[in-house]
Amino acid sequence: MESSRYSLDSTTTFAVSPTSPSTAHAIPKLHCEGLSLLHNNGKESPRSPTATRGWRDDTTQEDQRTARRSRVVVVTLYLLGFFTILVCTCATWGIVAYSTSQTYSQWASHVTSGKEGSLHLASDINGLVPEFSLRPQIFHPDPQPPTNATTPPSIWTSSFPLGNGFITTPPNFNPSINTHLPPPMKYKDQQVYSVAVFHQLHCLQMIMTRYHSLVDNSKRMEGHDDDDDGGDHSHINHCFGYLRQSLMCCGDTALEGQNLETQGKKVETDGMGVVHLCKDFQGVVEWVEGRRVSDERGV
């Protein structure tokens, strides 16, 4: 009885044995496997355990490499995002600090250079008070000179606005970020500043009132008539009126804050610690001295 056999060369033949049907069913399987091996040039079939295990190992290693690359990409993106935010934050704070430190130097350069810009003589350096138009103004003698210490002339009282020059700041205004503003006064849960020109007028009026009080007392003690002012008294009254109009002409709108000596117990200002935009007074003195008519000094 002949047995079935197979060969891996190109002349593979199959001898069929007239044995059991099971053998005949096995022939196509062997034939297919033989053809598969033939096309692989004698190499192991992918169906072999060794080839299957190698293919699985390669696939696993490729998946691991892909996962590692994904993790590296994610970590890199996180680091880039973190450093980007850090750099932007540092740059922002640097710009703010630089701008704050440069404000005063820019202002000083503007004033000394004489260039026209947003800053003007006797104006508010902080930008809270608007600029006002200029107009010619002629000084005149006061039509009603002061006559006593208790009743200031109407021309003096009319120089003060409603509120006497105390103003409130805009909502959500933070004075601590502005290096040119003193601490504000607190009044009825509001931040308050005084406009400088009205403080200056107030001080001049206080001096005038005190002067007339002394004059009145002197008159009563010496028995002089009220109309007997004398040349000095008239001269002093002229000076008060002249200085009043000078202050109004300048109209200094610098903002003045809380008097620190009161420690907030009183709502008042002493006008100290305030940045004013002024003319170079020493420059004015030197210019005048260069054109002087004599060498005398003093009042």
Image (tube, rainbow, N blue to C red):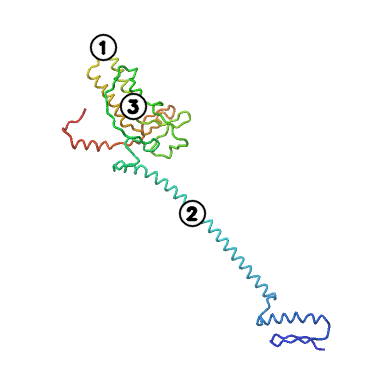
Q: Is residue 165 visible?
A: yes
> Which of pointers 1 and 3 lies earlier in the amino acid sequence?
3
Residue bearing the label numbered 3: 201
The disc labelled 1 sits on which kind of residue?
Asp
Q: Quadrant of residue 245?
A: top left
Q: Secondary structure at mark 1?
A: loop
| Residues at marks 1 and 3, CA–CA distance in whole angstroms | 30 Å
Residue 288: x percent and y percent? 21, 35
Q: Position of residue 215 (x, y in %)?
A: 28, 17
Residue indicated by mark 2:
84
- Looking at the image, which residue is at 42% across and 48% down? 95
Residue displayed at 22% across by 19% down: 231
Q: Amino acid at mark 2?
A: Thr
Q: Nearer the viewer, residue 37 or 82?
A: 37
| Residue 267 figure quarter | top left
Residue of label 1: 225
Q: Secondary structure at mark 2?
A: helix
Relative to 51, is 76 above or below?
above
